[in-house]
Amino acid sequence: MYWWDTLYNVLNTINVVILYVIGVPFFLQLIYMLLFWIPKKKFPKSDKINRIAIVIPAHNEEDVIFDTVKDVIDNQEYPRDMYDIYVIADNCTDNTIMLAKEAGATVIEHYDDDPKHHMVGYALKYGLKELLKYDGTKHYDYMIRLDADNHINKEFLSLMNDAYNAGCKIARPYESATNMTQSAFTKACGLYYIFDSRCSSRVRERLHLDAHVNGPGSLTDMDIIRRIDGYDTVTMCEDTEFNFKRMYEKIHPHFVEDAVVYEDLPSTLKDTLIRNKRLGHGNTVLLARHTHKLWFYTFRNLNFSFLENWLTYLFIPICPILCLWLPGFYIYAYIYHWLGGDAAFNQTFLLWGGDWVTFTTALIIFCISVLFAFCGILQGTLMVLSDYKKMGAQKRRELISGVLLFPVFSIVYVITITIGIFSKPKWEHVKRNPQKK
């Protein structure tokens, strides 16, 4: 046996192991899709009205901040005197501060000359510590975090209040989009992210697994904020790390499905790349820092939630495997068999390199690709059939182009996340698409 034969056998063994490893999180997502029919969790209506602090970190968000604050003030089915809005204006050089005040928010100004600190975590760390000064007289029960481009449905605060009084210390809402119907691209992008709300989060809540609480619309008990003296994460994916830390403290995060937060989706490939570069890099660092803890707490607490979180975030390092390893290995395998001139060679399979193994491999890859496209379209179809109104559509047919483009966007997602993993992204400004919900 020659050295190239040994190399091929080693690489082929590694490839088989990789296929099994990446198959586990994909199988988990398939389970979530198959359990699509499970009814959602509803929290009992509460008569108790709690005091809420709504916190909005913002950096140069003059295009959207006024409408975001004004919408929360004018359109909530919740007593106006029981919630206050705080905008944490982080290193703003535009009219964000003036517009936030004009809309009715209290503004906490934050300035930091260190470019390494120009991330939302540092703004929240400072802003929430300042919020505790107001808390001395206001006595807030919990806070809701919004992004500067977010809008919320009119029942949002009431529904979160019900969840809080039912015992939820940390909770996330259903995440949709303000500009879902803007283009086929935003429809496909929205369907990709909405899957985690409609399918994954619903199943987690019904199976008593911890919700993935990651930012927009999230609820946090003020006792937690007081105990940690504000905020205790400043990484690029600070919201996810904050959730992990609370899970380690045996706090069970929940999902409040009827409370909907609408965020502004990237409407171009460029803005998608900017966003996913942050996600790719940030979540890779996060996974490296917390993998051992998630496994440790899985076995110490006998709680599958930690392992489920790890398997879900494992999709991030899987992206470069899908982009680089799999194409590279199968191109190499084709060349190896084609140049090997082995006995199985015959003219019928010349295109596949001359042997049944490579032909079968190519056939399997083709079938997987077809299955991937079919599952993507089926997944998008199921979400549109049940939740099109939450997506901002008046009729289901408005979202058809997004369903058909859904598998293509999944590929775009994988590629842009891969680029992010191998880059050092800055906190670049993403173009906003101001729209009222």
Image (cartoon, rainbow, N blue to C red):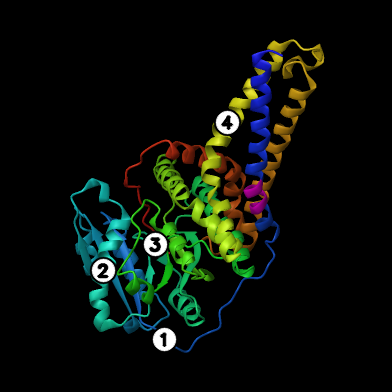
Q: Earlier in the sequence, mark 2 or mark 4?
A: 2
- Residue in front for this viewpoint, 357 or 389: 357
> Is the Cβ of the residue at disc 3 closer than 8 Å to that at disc 4?
no
Tell me the element at label 2.
Answer: helix
User: Which amino acid type corresponds to the residue marked 3 in the rendered image?
Assistant: Asn
Query: CA–CA distance between discs 1 and 2?
Result: 24 Å
Q: Residue at x 33, y 69 (%)?
A: 228
Residue identified by numbered label 4: 325
The mark nearer the N terminus, 3 or 2, is 2
> Which segment is the magenta one?
24-29
| Residue assigned mark 2 | 129
> Percent position (x, y) of residue 298?
57, 60
User: Quick one: SS at disc 3?
Assistant: loop
For residue 395, say whether it is visible: no
Estimate the x, y position of residue 352 in percent, counting from the top left: 73, 19
Location of residue 76 by image quarter: bottom left
Closer mark to the observer between disc 1 and disc 4: 4
Determine the CA span between mark 3 and mark 4: 38 Å
- Disc number for residue 338: none
Q: Is residue 269 left or right of residue 354?
A: left
* Residue drawn at the location 53% of the way across and 50% of the way down: 313
**Residue in the foreground of this view, choosing between 34 and 148:** 34
